[in-house]
Every structure is written in C-alpha cells, then in structure tokens.
Image (tube, rainbow, N blue to C red):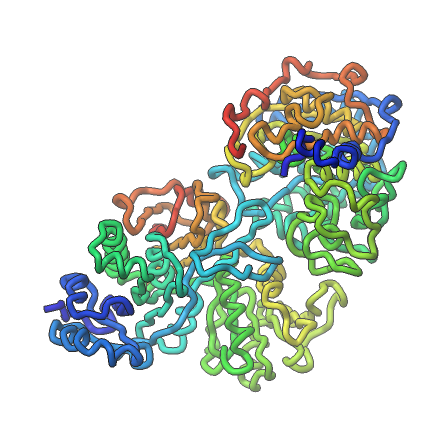
C-alpha cells in the first residue's frame, strides 16, 4: 500500500501524465512519497482502471477543481527566464524551454510563481497552497527546471504539483536511466523541502506593501505589481484592504494603494495615519483630493508629491500607471538606501527572505531562473540586517557548509558559490 | 559580423562601397592635433596613499587651481552596465567602474583648489532615477562623495534631469557619425569638463579609457533603445544598442546621422561616435583609474575577464594624448588601428574596430603620437602593466 500517514495537504501530489494510460504505470511511483494523484475530469473516463487501482493502493485522487481538504490550488506559469524584447516586454518566447540572453542589455524576463503563492496564502491562510505549474505543451524540460519549479513554490511556502513533460513521462514508462535519475532528483527536492517544514512558519520581511483587493478591476495592476516587485527583489507585503489592521504597515517604508475606487473612510484613515507617521504612500488619481501640501511641482515625471506629517503622499499622474516603471520608481522614491535585499551576479535570480518566529534566525532562499550557464559564477547577496553566521544548503548538493559573511553598517554580505537552481542560507544573529 | 574586407566581397563588386564605408569621412587635422603633457603615478590601492599620489599627479600637470578655481566642474564617471554585475565577488569599483574613493578624492582636491561647484555625472544603464539611487544599489555611499567638498551635486544625464532642455553640441568639421549630439544640460553648464575612465579593454572599441567613457554622456532618452520617435523619452529605459547597431535613428528632435548608408557595425560606429563626442564636448582633464581594474573586456558580461591590479593613475589635459599613454602602459601601440591589438576584437573573436584615438586625432582633438607627448612622473616602461600579455591564447568565438 502507498503510505497514507500524511494529511492530504502534506502529500506530494503528481499530475497524472496523459501518456500513462495503463494501471501498471502506478508501479513507477509506488513506494515513493507521492500520495496524491491529480486527474482532471476530462481524463477520468479513459483512466478508470488506473483510478480504481490507485484508490486500492491507497493513493488519494483529486483534481484542480476539487482539491483535497485544506488545500488551495493555484494556477501559475512555468517558472524560468527568457530574453526580454523591448524593455518591459517579454519576448514571444517559444514552446521550447526558454533561455536567458547574454550581454549588458540582456535583462531577462523572469516567470516566477512566487507572488501567486503569496497572494493565495494571504487569501486562504488556513490552507496549504499547491501550485499547478505545468510545462508548456511541446516543451522539453531540462532536469534542473523541475527542481526550479519545486523550489519556486517552496521558497514561497507552497508546494509544486509535480508535472512532467512528455519526454519524462515516456522515459519513465520505458525505464530509461536518465528519466529515472531526473525522477529521483525531483523526489529528493520534494523531500528536501519536506524536511524543512519549520521554514514555512518563518515570517516574510518587506519594506514595501501593496494594499488592494487584487480582484475585479484591480486584479491586473495589483497582481502585476506583486509579480514585478518580486522579480526586482523588492519584496512586498500583500495586504488585503478589507483586512488591513492598524499595525499591518509597521516597518513598511513605502505602501502602494492604486485601486480603481477611493478607499473607504476607515481604510483611508489607516493609510493616512501611516503616511503621517513617516511612510511614503503611493496612490493614484482615483484616490480623490490629496491630503497634505503640494511640494516641488513637476519634480518627477510620473508623480506629484504632497507633504503629510512626517511622510508624504506620492500621487501617480496616470490613472493606470505602467507597473514596469512603478516597481522601479517606488523603491527609488523611498530610496534604495533602505533596500532590504540586493543580489549581484544573478540577474535572473530572486531572493526570498524570511525570519523565524522568535526573530533570532533568518533564512534567505535564492532561486536562479536562468537556464543557461551565462553568468553562472559566484553570487553575492546583501541583506540589510546584521548576521554573524550563515550556512548554505542546496537541494542535492553536499552537506551544509559555512558561507563567508561580511558585516558593515548593519548589513550583511553573503559570498555564495555559483547557484544553478536553488540555495537556502540559514542566518544566525 | 566581420568587418574584414574579403576576397569574396571584392569579387561581388562591393569593394568600392565597402572600402569607402570603412574609411568614412576624411578629416585632415591629425598633423596639427595638439599635444599636452600626461602624468603617470604609481598607486597600489585606494587607501591613504591615493591622495598624495593624486596631488602629485595634478601638480605635475600644473596644479588644479589654475583649472578649476571658481569654476563649475563636471566629472563624467564610469558606471557601465547593469548594477548587479560583478567579477566573482568583487564590487564593480574594483574591476570595471571608476572607484568612488578615487571620485571622492578628486572631488576633495578640486574643492580644495577652489572649485565653485562640482557635478558628478553618469548616464547609467536603463535608469532615469537620481544618480545617487543607482550608486546606492551598488552598495556605494553617495554622501561620501557629496561631503568631499562643498557644492557637490549628482546628475543622471540619461534624461533632462534638472534641466529644462537638452544642449546641442555640434561636432567640429561636421563629425564622423553625427553632425551634433544633444546632451544633458550639465555638459554645457560647466566651465571644466573632466572624464574619469577606467583602464580597460573594450569588446567593441578596443580600449575604454577617458575618451570612450564619454560615450555614456549620450542620454538614453535620445540615443537609447527606448528613445522616442519624435521627441526624447523622459521615461528612459534600456541601453544604447542602436548606437552600436544603427538599426534606427534618434528622435526627430535630434539631428540624424551624416550617412545612414555607412556600415551598421559597432566597430565602425562606436569609435566614430566617441571621437565626435570628445571633439564636440572637449575634455579639459582626463583621468584614468588604473589602480584596480580588469583585463579582457569592459565588464563582467565579456567571457574570460580577470581582475587586475596595475596600481597606476594617469592624467592629462588632452584626452587623446592621455589615452595614448594609457594604451602604452597597457602594452599596446597607440598608433595601432583596426586588426591590430587592441583593435582586433580583444584577440578572441569579437568584431574588429577602428581606433577611437586615430579618429579623434583626425578631428584635431589631440595627438596619439608618443613622440609628441611629454610623459612625466613614472616612466611608461616602469608603469607598464601588459594587458596584451594577459589575452587568451585561443580564440573563443572564431
């Protein structure tokens, strides 16, 4: 029998490959940590025998429309990086696995599902978040890319639903050695994240926040800000406006409210109190008449500024500001002096920084979305917190080792080796 | 794309046009190009030894006071490429950017020499933000530079910045590539213009010293990928790829190229654009930071680059002559041209290029002939740090 001692939400879930139409295919995953099979409704009629045997073997069956209890499933793009077309626009890409471009002007476009997980965790905090990111149709996925998908979800507190491309599914069925090795690496990655469940309780740290309902008319801009800010290594707190507490913006240096409707009076009071106490509040024309005193008109191409108590209001001149510029502007308006994170020599990398509930330990996880070897050299990370010790862990690398760390003026620089896919650095004060 | 004139090219009948293209517009001012003395100083690090070395260097050129007293000084520094690139774990200032400690020291000495105002300028990659914000992202502390003298300012020259309009700089004799360049007001609102480059090779231009540093003076609002069609784009993004490739023209508000039919090759275009700029916006003081640098290219995006520590500072009041001496210190012949080191595609397969020094000399900016240049301080043979000897033996791309 397949082990069933885990709660459904803690199981490793596998999207059942279309190519596996015979029940004996279950033998390929029997005895592994996979406990839940996702089979969508349209496939069930032709997989009757598979499903019957799976249930008899103790596998849980689910589909994305009816997730197991305690689970929210979110859909996301396959994570990776690809060359950018004109600045701010992704290139058309291809069905094949994308690769990043080289050169000083080759800023890559990174597809990360991290912000999707963050938003889902805020919306359904009681649930585990499973991420449904599948390889594009016809894509040939390299082994590292599966690890990247697992890491991308896990670094954000989610769990990737293991999804294979046709090659891997067929290769496993044919018992090909390279496919079996890839499969083992995927399972090792899942085990790695399962063995560090405490990390899921670590709290996200951010100096910026987005306040929105992230839905309806506000869905695109709110979510795109989260997406692009994450990609720029400017972590944001995701704050639902209906639940905004008086303390939610504590420690935040820049808060963005750009919903299409003015805030309700109570929300407006909270946001103004935040700005008045020294924060930067970024709003749009829909905010209504700005409070405070207009200062230095025309000082900025995209914002007007109003002094408000110890802080200020930055009013975007456009009703629908370009999120590409917005996520670059806000950290500069706050000042990059207060950047929480800086990442060097990994231009397709994203850092995820959290701290232990007791506050005595930190964790920085790095996911490298670049699929080419360009820039695959040593990486430097700066965290604006003082740490004295740092230990590096990788999914299938050697035992954890100490990382050289340099502290200066309350910040720590970590000198890491090349990180092809993922690394976690445990930080001690 | 190769720029070499092949037998096949000749047979196809393109020889005349191709040759004319590579030759470009003839300017005959090399013989009368002025010369000025160039000073070299040993300086192994950016520590306490740097200020005395710089003081001595400037004194050998006649002192800073005569140049900057009661003047507004603009210093174009070098922060090429994206902020997050590093060679290994080394910060960019120790490999491919001018070092902020050197910038601070120069600013300090200029303040001490009575400069009225000092503006530090750069048009960093894809940024319209204040320059100090770019510096902060590189872990620099801009206050150290701001506090090094009184009346110090920063300006990001990628866009209008604090100005209301762009300043047009006509190129003497009509220019190799453009008849004039539209630049940020700070390049006009100064009495003294200083180019502070790094001692480096360059994949497209052979070397990047005090002249090539001035390429970054071009605002990306006009000369960048994100430039507008009719007007400058004051939301500047990207780099200056079209200046390399020539696949488009600047906005109609700026003057177009002299000859859109000229070769669309970086190795042809970039040296000419740089020569034009230093002719149009004369450099009063050229400083080359060779204390710590890198060999094998201009930035970490070039394969096989390595950090080096030549321990050298070079300065002069003529940018062409200063760069000629710097080339000699790097082990290259400043009279060299396309096909010979360092204008041979870094020796490992990049496109060959024309000599910026020769092109600027032809515009009458300055001489590159060492026989006509007085070198003071450390002799070239003692300062020699051979970049040529560090070149890879095997071509990477052929």
Is residue B47 something that shows in the picture?
no
Is residue B59 something that shows in the picture?
yes
Left or right: residue A93 compared with residue A423:
right
Residue at left offset 27%, top offset 75%: A39
Closer to the camera, B384 or B202? B202
Residue at left offset 48%, top offset 62%: A230
Which of the 4 image quadrants contains residue B359?
top right
Left or right: residue B125 compared with residue B111:
left
Residue B317: x %, y % from top left: 80, 27
Residue at left offset 27%, top offset 60%: A170
Which of the 4 image quadrants contains residue A407?
top left
Left or right: residue B392 compared with residue B29:
left
Residue A25: x %, y % from top left: 18, 65
Residue A333: x %, y % from top left: 63, 61
Above or below: residue B10 compared with residue B57: below
Left or right: residue A402 compared with residue B398:
left
Above or below: residue A276 compared with residue A228: below
Residue A389: x %, y % from top left: 35, 46
Closer to the camera, A249 or B298? B298
């Amino acid at each position: 029998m397949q082990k069933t001692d885990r709660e459904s939400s803690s199981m490793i879930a596998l999207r059942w490959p279309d190519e596996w139409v015979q029940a004996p295919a279950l033998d390929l995953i029997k005895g592994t940590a996979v406990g839940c099979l996702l089979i969508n409704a349209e496939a069930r009629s032709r997989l009757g025998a598979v499903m019957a045997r799976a249930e008899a073997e103790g596998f849980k069956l689910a589909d994305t429309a009816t997730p197991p209890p305690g689970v929210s499933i979110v859909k996301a793009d396959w994570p990776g990086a690809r060359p950018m077309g004109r600045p701010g626009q992704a290139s058309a890409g291809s069905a094949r696995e994308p690769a990043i471009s080289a050169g000083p002007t080759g800023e890559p476009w990174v597809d990360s599902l991290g912000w999707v997980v963050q938003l889902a965790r805020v919306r359904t905090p009681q649930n585990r978040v499973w991420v449904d990111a599948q390889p594009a149709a016809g894509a040939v996925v390299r082994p590292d890319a599966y690890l990247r998908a697992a890491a991308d979800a896990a670094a954000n507190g989610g769990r990737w639903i293991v999804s294979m491309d046709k090659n891997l599914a067929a290769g496993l069925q044919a018992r090909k050695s390279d496919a079996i090795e890839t499969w083992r690496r995927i399972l090792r990655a899942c085990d790695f994240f399962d063995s560090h469940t405490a990390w899921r309780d670590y709290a996200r740290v951010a100096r910026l926040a987005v306040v929105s309902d992230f839905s309806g008319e506000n869905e695109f801009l709110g979510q795109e800000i989260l997406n692009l800010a994450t990609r720029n290594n400017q972590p944001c707190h995701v704050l639902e406006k209906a639940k905004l507490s008086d303390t939610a913006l504590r420690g935040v240096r820049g808060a963005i409210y750009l919903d299409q409707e003015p805030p309700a009076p109570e929300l407006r009071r909270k946001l103004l109190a935040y700005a008045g106490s020294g924060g930067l509040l970024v709003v749009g024309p829909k905010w209504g008449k700005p409070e405070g005193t207009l200062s230095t008109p025309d000082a900025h191409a995209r914002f007007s500024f109003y002094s408000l108590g110890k802080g200020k209001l930055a009013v975007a001149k456009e009703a629908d500001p370009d999120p590409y510029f917005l996520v670059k502007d806000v950290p500069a308006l706050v000042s990059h002096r207060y950047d929480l994170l800086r990442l060097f020599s990994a231009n397709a990398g994203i850092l995820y920084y959290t701290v232990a509930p007791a506050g005595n330990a930190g964790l920085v996880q790095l996911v490298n979305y670049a699929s080419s070897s360009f820039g695959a050299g040593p990486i430097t990370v700066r965290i604006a917190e003082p740490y004295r010790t740092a230990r590096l862990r990788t999914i299938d690398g050697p035992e954890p080792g100490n990382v050289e760390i340099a502290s200066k003026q309350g910040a720590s620089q970590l000198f890491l080796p090349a990180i092809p896919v993922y690394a976690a650095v445990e930080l001690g004060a | 794309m190769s720029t070499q004139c092949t037998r096949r090219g000749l047979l196809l009948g393109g020889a005349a046009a191709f040759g004319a293209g590579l030759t470009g517009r003839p300017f005959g001012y090399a013989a009368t190009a002025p010369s000025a003395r160039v000073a070299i100083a040993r300086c192994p690090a950016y520590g306490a030894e740097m200020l005395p070395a710089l003081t001595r260097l400037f004194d050998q050129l006649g002192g800073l006071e005569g140049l900057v007293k009661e003047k507004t000084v603009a210093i174009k520094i070098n922060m090429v490429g994206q902020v997050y690139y590093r060679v290994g774990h080394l910060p960019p200032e120790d490999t491919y950017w001018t070092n902020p400690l050197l910038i601070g020291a120069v600013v300090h000495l200029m303040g001490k020499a009575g400069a009225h105002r000092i503006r530090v300028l750069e048009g960093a990659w894809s940024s319209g933000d204040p320059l100090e914000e770019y510096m902060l992202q590189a872990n620099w502390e801009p206050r150290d530079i701001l506090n090094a003298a009184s009346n110090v300012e920063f300006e990001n020259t990628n866009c209008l910045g604090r100005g209301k309009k762009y300043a047009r700089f006509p190129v003497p004799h009509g220019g190799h590539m453009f008849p004039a360049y539209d630049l940020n007001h700070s390049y006009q609102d100064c009495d003294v213009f200083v180019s502070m480059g790094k001692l480096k090779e360059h994949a497209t231009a052979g070397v990047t010293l005090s002249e090539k540093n001035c390429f970054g003076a071009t605002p990306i609002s006009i000369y960048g990928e994100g430039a507008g069609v009719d007007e400058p784009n004051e939301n500047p993004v990207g780099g200056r790829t079209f200046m390399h490739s020539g696949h488009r023209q600047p906005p109609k508000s700026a003057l177009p190229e002299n000859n859109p039919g000229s070769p669309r090759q970086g190795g042809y275009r970039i040296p000419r654009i740089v020569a034009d700029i230093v002719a149009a916006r004369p450099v009063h003081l050229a400083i080359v930071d060779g204390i710590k640098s890198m060999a094998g290219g201009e930035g970490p995006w070039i394969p096989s680059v390595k950090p080096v520590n030549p321990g050298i500072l070079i300065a002069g009041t003529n940018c062409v002559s200063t760069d000629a001496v710097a080339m000699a210190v790097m082990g290259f012949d400043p009279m060299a041209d396309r096909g010979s080191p360092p204008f041979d595609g870094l020796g490992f397969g990049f496109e060959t290029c024309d000599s910026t020094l020769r092109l600027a000399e032809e515009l009458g900016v300055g001489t590159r002939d060492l026989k006509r240049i007085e070198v003071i301080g450390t002799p070239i043979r003692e300062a020699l740090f051979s970049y040529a000897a560090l070149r890879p033996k095997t071509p990477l791309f052929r």
